[in-house]
Image: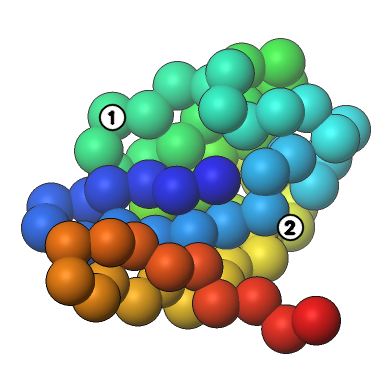
């Protein structure tokens, strides 16, 4: 899952750690991502759990090169 906060991009796991709900269906206000099913919330810049959420999101480094974004994941 790619999020843009300000001028930066952040990449995280695509599913909520609570019940494996697709986070792309959630709500995003530019700073906080909210899972639409159980309202767990996450900081867009760090992936940290906020409010009721009990686990953070797994984050991945993002690299911008020649106008393209690359999510760096280990094999």
* Residue receiving disc 1: 29
Residue positioned 34% across, 62% down in the render: 69
Q: Which residue is mark 2?
A: 55
Residue 67 in picture, x, y percent from top left: 17, 62
Q: Using the rendered image of the protein, determine whether residue 46 is visible from the camera's viewpoint.
A: no
Where 33 falls versus 12 (above or below)? above
Q: Earlier in the sequence, mark 2 or mark 1?
A: 1
Determine the secondary structure under disc 2.
Answer: loop
Q: Residue 35: x, y in percent?
A: 61, 27
Would residue 71 appear left or right of 39 to someone viewing this image? left
Mark 2 and mark 1: Cα distance apart in space: 20 Å
Q: Quadrant of residue 60?
A: bottom right
Depth check, front residue: 49 or 59: 59
Is residue 44 shown to the viewer in this render? Answer: yes
- Which residue occupies 88% across, 33% down? 19
Dot 1 lies on which element? loop
- The x and y percentages for residue 15 are 74, 40
Neighbour tally class for label 1: few under 14, some 14-19, many 20 plus, Cα within 10 Å: few
């Amino acid at each position: 899952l790619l999020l843009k906060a300000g001028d930066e991009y952040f990449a995280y796991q695509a599913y909520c750690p609570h019940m494996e709900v697709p986070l792309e269906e959630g709500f995003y206000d530019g700073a906080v991502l909210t899972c639409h099913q159980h309202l767990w919330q996450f900081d867009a810049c760090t992936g940290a759990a906020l409010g009721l959420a009990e686990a953070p999101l797994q984050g991945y480094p993002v690299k911008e090169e020649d106008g393209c974004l690359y999510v760096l994941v280990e094999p």
